[in-house]
């Protein structure tokens, strides 16, 4: 398939991995505008390849060039003195519980489980492409994805899960790199923009968050942002919902390290 050859050549240059085999696209899912997303995505990649031909050198991964854009939202900026350490695309589920005896009860969040894919070099090189990745990632089913995020060959850079219902945890220690691990507390939250990508069944995007790490975090990890979310929200009430359920989501995660000034 021509488009995946283009994809492999672009992302391959960034991630230094073997050529990927593409999982099938979920083109018939209920995601509105999905075909448009995939087309947009491949068009953009084709354009990047074109631009790449006129570059004197291969794209260089320099995190100081990556800029987190939280401007349209009221999330506080990272503490002064912190430095960007890693950017990942998370793809997984938000988990909820419901009181099945009460149709007006509100679903409670019990956690999330996601695979983190290394998007640091994309963030440094192609920020416009980066911002399409959560939406694109929603086009592929989790089980299918396994070790891959759709047809991209972005490497896995970690895992995200909860250690209890209020403690999101990030483990960035893999065989490829050891960047640290951290339990976190929510420091601030703001609704995703109204035009944020919806989930596979049209679920609204989960809020954008600022998290701060707990004492005991390794790798000098201090703050984690969840932005550019896609899907993941529970319905407004428990009406017709089972006692436990999951909602597919994707997001960008930005990790900051250092010592706050
Ligand atoms: C993705 O999962 C949904 C729900 O389980 C299923 O209906 C759909 O066929 C799957 N799509 C692909 C491409 O596997
Ligand atoms: C979140 O940050 C905004 C501005 O940065 C601030 O006005 C608001 O009070 C903060 N909310 C919480 C819960 O800290
Ligand atoms: C059902 O949930 C609503 C919303 O949380 C709450 O106000 C109400 O008291 C609950 N009813 C029962 C019977 O628990
Ligand atoms: C969330 O869903 C995942 C995937 O099914 C499951 O492995 C995990 O145990 C669930 N976590 C919680 C906290 O319910
Ligand atoms: C992400 O990819 C870059 C470039 O290949 C690499 O330097 C970095 O160690 C990777 N990070 C993780 C957490 O795997
Ligand atoms: C969850 O874990 C955190 C950190 O270990 C702890 O401070 C908090 O009390 C725990 N909360 C619950 C409800 O167990």
Image (cartoon, helix red, strand yellow):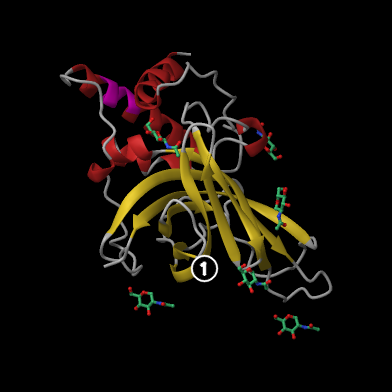
- The residue identified by callout 1 is 185
State whether residue 188 appears in this view.
yes
State whether residue 93 appears in this view.
no
117 and 149: which is toward the camera:
117
- View extreme (right): residue: 101
Q: Quadrant of ligand 6?
A: bottom right
Query: As displayed, is residue 189 above or below residue 174?
Result: below
Instruction: Examine the image and state in which quarter residue 58 appears.
Output: top left
Coordinates of residue 247 in the picture (x, y in percent): 64, 53
Q: Mark 1 falls on what kind of element? A: strand
What residue do we see at 45% from left, 21% from top?
17
Please say whether residue 215 is one of the residues in the magenta stretch: no
What residue do we see at 48% from left, 13% from top?
1
Residue 45 shown left or right of residue 158 in the figure: left
Query: As displayed, is residue 128 above or below residue 245?
Result: above
39 and 227: which is toward the camera:
227
Extent of the magenta region = 45-49
What residue do we see at 55% from left, 30% from top?
148
Residue 166 shown left or right of residue 99 in the figure: left
Residue 140 shown left or right of residue 110 in the figure: left
**Disc 1: residue Cβ within 8 A of ligand 6's nearest atom:** no
72 and 117: which is toward the camera:
117
For the C terminus, give its image quadrant.
bottom left
Tell me which secondary structure the magenta stretch mostly adopts.
helix
Coordinates of residue 192 in the picture (x, y in percent): 43, 61
Query: As displayed, is residue 55 above or below residue 129?
Result: above
């Amino acid at each position: 398939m021509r488009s995946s050859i283009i994809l492999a050549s672009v992302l391959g240059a960034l991630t230094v991995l073997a050529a990927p085999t593409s999982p099938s696209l979920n083109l018939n899912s209920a995601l509105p505008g999905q075909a448009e997303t995939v087309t947009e995505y491949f068009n953009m990649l084709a354009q990047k390849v074109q631009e790449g031909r006129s570059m004197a050198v291969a794209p260089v991964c320099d995190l100081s060039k990556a800029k987190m854009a939280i401007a349209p939202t009221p999330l506080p900026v990272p503490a002064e003195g912190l430095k960007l350490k890693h950017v990942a695309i998370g793809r997984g589920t938000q988990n909820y519980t419901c009181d099945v005896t009460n149709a007006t009860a509100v679903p409670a969040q019990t956690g999330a489980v996601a695979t983190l894919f290394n998007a640091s070099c994309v963030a440094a090189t192609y920020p416009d492409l980066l911002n399409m990745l959560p939406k694109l990632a929603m086009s592929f089913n989790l089980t299918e994805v396994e070790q891959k995020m759709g047809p991209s060959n972005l490497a896995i850079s970690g895992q995200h899960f909860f250690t209890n219902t209020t403690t999101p945890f990030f483990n960035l220690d893999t065989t490829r790199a050891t960047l640290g691990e951290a339990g976190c507390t929510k420091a601030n939250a703001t609704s995703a923009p109204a035009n944020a990508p919806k989930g596979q069944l049209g679920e609204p995007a989960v809020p954008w968050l600022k998290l701060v790490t707990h004492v005991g975090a390794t790798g000098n990890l201090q703050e984690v942002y969840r932005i550019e979310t896609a899907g993941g929200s529970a319905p407004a009430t428990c009406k017709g919902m089972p006692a436990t359920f999951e909602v597919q989501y994707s997001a960008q995660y930005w990790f900051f390290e250092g010592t706050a000034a």
